[in-house]
Amino acid sequence: MKKIRNFCIIAHIDHGKSTLADRLLEFTGTVSKRDAQEQFLDNMDLERERGITIKSHAIQMKYKFENEEYTLNLIDTPGHVDFSYEVSRSIAACEGALLIVDAAQGIQAQTISNLYLALENDLEIIPVINKVDLPSAEPEIVADQIIDLIGCEEDKIISASAKTGIGIENILKAIIERVPPPNGDINKPLQAMIFDSVYNPFRGIEAYFKILNGEIKKGGKVKFIATGKEYFADEIGVLKLKQEPKKKMSAGEVGYIISGIKEAKEVKVGDTITTVENPATDAIQGFEDVKPMVFAGIYPVDTDDYEELRNSMEKLQLNDASLTYEPESSTALGFGFRCGFLGMLHMEIIQERLEREFDMTVITTVPNVSYFAYTTKGEKLAIHNPSDLPDGSILDYVEEPYIRAQIITKSDFVGTIMTLCIERRGELKNQVYLTTDRVELSFEMPLGEIVFDFYDKLKTVSRGYASFDYQPLDYRRSNLAKLDILLNGDQVDALSALIHRDHAYDFGKKICVKLRELIPRQQFDIAIQSAIGSKIISRETVKALRKDVTAKCYGGDITRKRKLLEKQKKGKKRMRKVGNVEIPQNAFMAVLKLDG
C-alpha cells in the first residue's frame, strides 16, 4: 500500500486536463507511441467532437522513482459544471488532486468549485500552472492567485506545459512525494466503494470500485450493502490500457468487478461492496444525492419503442448517475419519461447519447419544474406537466418552488449579473467580497426561471467566469398562467409552459416567431398562435407555397385568371381541414434557446 498513489486531475473547462493526462501516460510508458492519440482517455465520439470530457476516466500507471516502482491510479475528470457530479465521485476515490490552472486565463469558477469539493474530502492539493509556453501566459500573476486561494508556498506550485511536456517529471515526483498513500487496513472486513459503472453488452455490468479496507478475491462471494444482493466475483482486476484481471486485490487499490449483473437497478454508485463470509457492518459514507436542475419529457418518436427506451435509459443511468427519470404520459406524444438533468448541456448530451449509443430517436419537451396547484375545494395537486394544471374555473392559486442561488463572480460583472437575476424575478439577499475582486452574491428566485437558459446567460454576461450553485428553499404563491401553443387551432401539449403572467406575452410572441422560422411551408397557410386559456395573445402565419396556376394563361380576359385563383383558394381551404402539421424535432429544441 505504501507504493500506491490515487489522484485525480481537476480544473475549469479547457485548462488542459486531458492533454496533461496524455503526457503522464506517455511519460510513464503506459501508452506506446503507436497507440497514442490526442485526448487519449476521451473515448466517446461525442467527447472528441466537442472537445470536452463528459465521463471521468480511470487508468493505472507504473512509474519507477528512486529505484522503487510505484502504482499511480489517475482519474481524468470533466471541467464543465453540468458534469460536476462526475468530479465529486472521482474525488471520493482519491487521496490527492492535481489542480490545473491555465497560465493565460487564471483561476476561474469551476477551478474554485472543484477545489472546494477536493478540500471537503481532505485531498492533498498539488497546484500546477499549465500552458506556460503560451505567449499570453502570466505565470507570476496566476501563482499569486493560487497562493491567495489555497495559501500554499510559491515553491509548491509546479509550472508545466502539457503540450510540450515541460514539467511532467516534476508533477510525477510531486505526486509520489506529496500525495499520501491510501490508509486502509487489510485485516478489517472488506469495504469497497463503487464510484462508477459501465454497461458491457456481453458481460453485464462492470462496477469500478476503490477498496478502503480488507481484500477481495476472484470467485469470492460479495454483497452490495445498499441493495442487499449477493454475487460471485467472476472477475476482478485493475484498469490499465485494457482491463487486467487479478486473483486478489487489497486495501488502497482501484479496480473493476464483473459479477454477471444484468439489471441496472442492482448497481448504485456510492454503494459499498463487502464479503458474505466476513461482512462489514456499515456502508461507506460520502455520497450526496444529485440535484437535478432541469426537468424535461423524453418520448420515443415511435410509441412502440417505449420499452426499448426504458432499457436504454437504465443503461445510460449506469454510466451517468446524475440522470434521474420517472415514467409519464402525454396526449400528443404517448408514453415517455420525465427526466431530471444537471443543466442544458447535460440534457443535450443525454439526447445525443440515446441517439448514438442506443439508436433511439427521441422527442424532448420544453424543460420545466414541478408546481403545486390548489383548487377552490382546498385540494393540493402536484403538477409535473403543464397539461396537468386544473381548469381555471376550479383553480384557486399555484405555488412554485423557490431556491437560494449563490453566484461567485469577478467584481466587474456584478452589475450585469444583478440585472439578469432581477429580470428573472430574483431578490438580492446578500453580497460578500471574498477577495478584492471576487464577490459572492446570494439571491432568492423561482426555480422555474433558471431551468431555461439562465445558466447559459449567466456564463455569457460573466464571460464564463461566474459559478452558480443553489439550494431548494420552499414553495411560494405566484401569479402563474399556462401558455398553450396552437397549430391550426390544435394544441401542442409538448410546447405548453407554465409561466409568470407578466412574462407570458413576450414569451408567447417569441415562440410563435421562432416556430414560424422552423416549421416547413405546406400547401396551405399554417396559423401559429399562443394562448392563455381561451384568449389568443399572439399569432404568426406560415404562408402557403403557391403554384402559379395562371402561368398558362396569356392575354385574354381577367375573369379567366380570377376563376383559376378562386379554384386554388377553395382547394387550399379544403386541404387545410384535412392537412396535419409535422413539427420538426429542432422546433422543440429551439424553444429552449430563445434569446432575451
Image (spheres, rainbow, N blue to C red):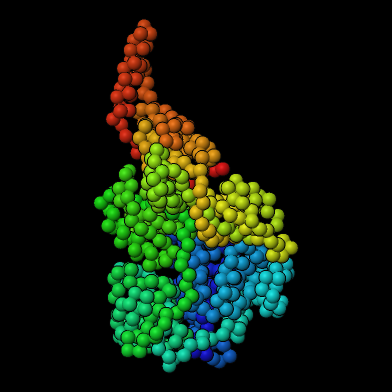
* Residue 49 visible somewhere in the drawing: no
- The total number of labels drawn is 0
Whole-percent x and y of residue 82?
Answer: 50, 60
* Residue 132 sits above or below residue 379 on the image: below
Q: Residue at x 49, y 80 (%)?
A: 73
Residue situated furthest front in the rendering: 377
Residue placed most toward the observer, 198 or 344: 344
Give the left or right position of residue 79, taking residue 542 as reference: right
Give the left or right position of residue 115, taking residue 524 as reference: right
Whole-percent x and y of residue 16?
Answer: 57, 67
Whole-percent x and y of residue 380?
Answer: 40, 51
Q: Residue at x 57, y 78 (%)?
A: 123
Give the left or right position of residue 562, taking residue 532 as reference: left
In the picture, which quadrant includes the C terminus?
top right
Whole-percent x and y of residue 233?
Answer: 32, 82
Residue placed most toward the observer, 241 or 528: 528
Q: Residue at x 68, y 54 (%)?
A: 414
Classify residue 395 by image quadrant. top left
* Residue 395 sits above or below residue 77 on the image: above
Q: Residue at x 51, y 43 (%)?
A: 479
* Residue 559 visible somewhere in the drawing: yes
Residue situated furthest left in the rendering: 304
Classify residue 109 by image quadrant. bottom right
Residue placed most toward the observer, 532 or 154: 532
